[in-house]
Image: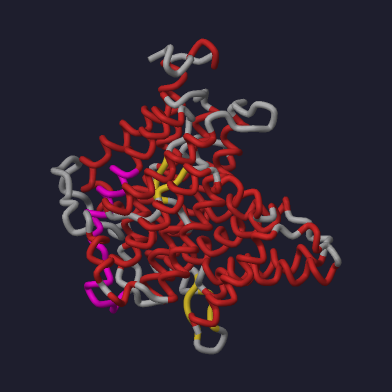
Amino acid sequence: MKNYFEFGKMGTSYRQEFIGGLTTFLAMAYILAVNPLTLSLASVKGLPASMHMDQGAVFVATAIASAIGSIVMGLFGKYPLALAPGMGLNAFFAYTVVLSYKIPWQHALAAVFISGVFFFLLTLTGIREKLINAIPIQLKHAIGAGIGLFITFIGLKDAGIIVGDDATFVALGDLSKGPVLLSIFGLVVTVILMTRGIKGSVFYGIILTSIVGMIFGLLKVPHQVVSSVPSLSPTFGALFSSFGDSSFWSAQMIGAILTFFFVDFFDNAGTLVAVANQAGLMKDNKLPNAGRALVSDSIATIIGAVLGTSTTTSFVESSSGVAAGARTGFASLVTACFFILSIFFFPLLSVITTNVTAPALIIVGVLMVSNLRHIEWDKFEIAVPAFLTLIAMPLTYSIATGIAIGFIFYPITMIVKGRIKEIHPVMYFFFVVFLLYFIFLK
């Protein structure tokens, strides 16, 4: 094992890799609680039962998809990167595709599956890297920041801190209510832990908030800690029924597939570069075995969709494991083992409500919005598409719309500014695609 992962060359050890893998798990374990609540639309009342995914099944799918994705990345990609259903993509899956478009969640899983297959094929041909390079870096940063704003808005809504209002659209909620106060407590605690630089702050914040919620009777007290694994049957393979349904092939579904495709595109590439750079794995400004890492991400997305969860992708929280010493894919195997063990602890996570996980969404949003510092705001031709991209996501409650608007305005402002030579030909293709997206969506 030492020879396979080149411990000597990387200057690491079993102990160092174990600590790094455990740290990564603690930093991203919140997804085990957040993802089932998000995909099941637990915070949305009055919906038909058919629109709510089974939380137990999604929990198991999340854990297994994360474990398999991390194992493939560790053994094949050899990077200290752990994978799990991505934040932002799960929100798009639940709140845009299922809730706003009224598309069955089975269809949404099929869209994730198709995007994963596209990724796999494009990665094998090398086209994926070329397409990534064709997207202006400014728009990549804007997309990341926009998703951060969108996730934060969802978190504030789930917490009850922000509520709907007929006169002003949104307003401040009733901060005297117990569940809202619990969310505020969780946010304050998590902010304090994050500020102190404690590894796994988001996860610990959820644990402490849950304990306080149970003490004050705001959450149910679990009757057991360990139980049998919840059934995966409600979601396993459910996507395959969509391919024989004529309603699946619609303009909205094409838009959904493209969005899953593009967002995972940027998210995985950005995370891979950031974590590899932090670990000192970059060579001559290039990523060794980058193709293998991208293939691993594609396989994880395909498997995750079959199991019953949204796009599985590389987690930027892996950087916490790297900071703790992780340097090889062995750390990813350690993280995978903890995800496998977690499936037996569903009773503990089943008592967690959206008021408990809302602070995690807000904090993740804060981290993602940090991309704004890389945008050239002093150049109007860049500022316009970037701003419209990030602001449209929360205001239209759609990641797809934000991406589409930004990709339409970018060629326009750049051509008018006289920077036509800087526009990659692929961007004209995206311009046409998203124009058609709005025409057919309307």
Q: Quadrant of residue 97?
A: bottom left
Q: Residue furthest left?
A: 228
Q: Nearer the viewer, residue 316 or 358?
A: 316
Q: Residue at x 58, y 52 (%)?
A: 368
Magenta-drawn stretch, dominant element (helix, strand or loop): helix
* Residue 246 x/y as whole percent: 29, 76
Q: Nearer the viewer, residue 343 or 188?
A: 343
Q: Quadrant of residue 420?
A: bottom right
Quarter of the image that includes the N terminus: top left
**Left or right of 433: which side holds 175?**
left
**Left or right of 60: which side holds 99?**
right
Can residue 159 be spotted in the picture?
no
* Residue 182 x/y as whole percent: 41, 59
Q: Residue furthest bottom?
A: 167
Q: Residue furthest right?
A: 418
Residue 48 magenta-drawn?
A: yes
Q: Residue at x 38, y 36 (%)?
A: 70
Q: Nearer the viewer, residue 392 or 320?
A: 392
Q: Which range of residues does the magenta coloring cover?
A: 45-65
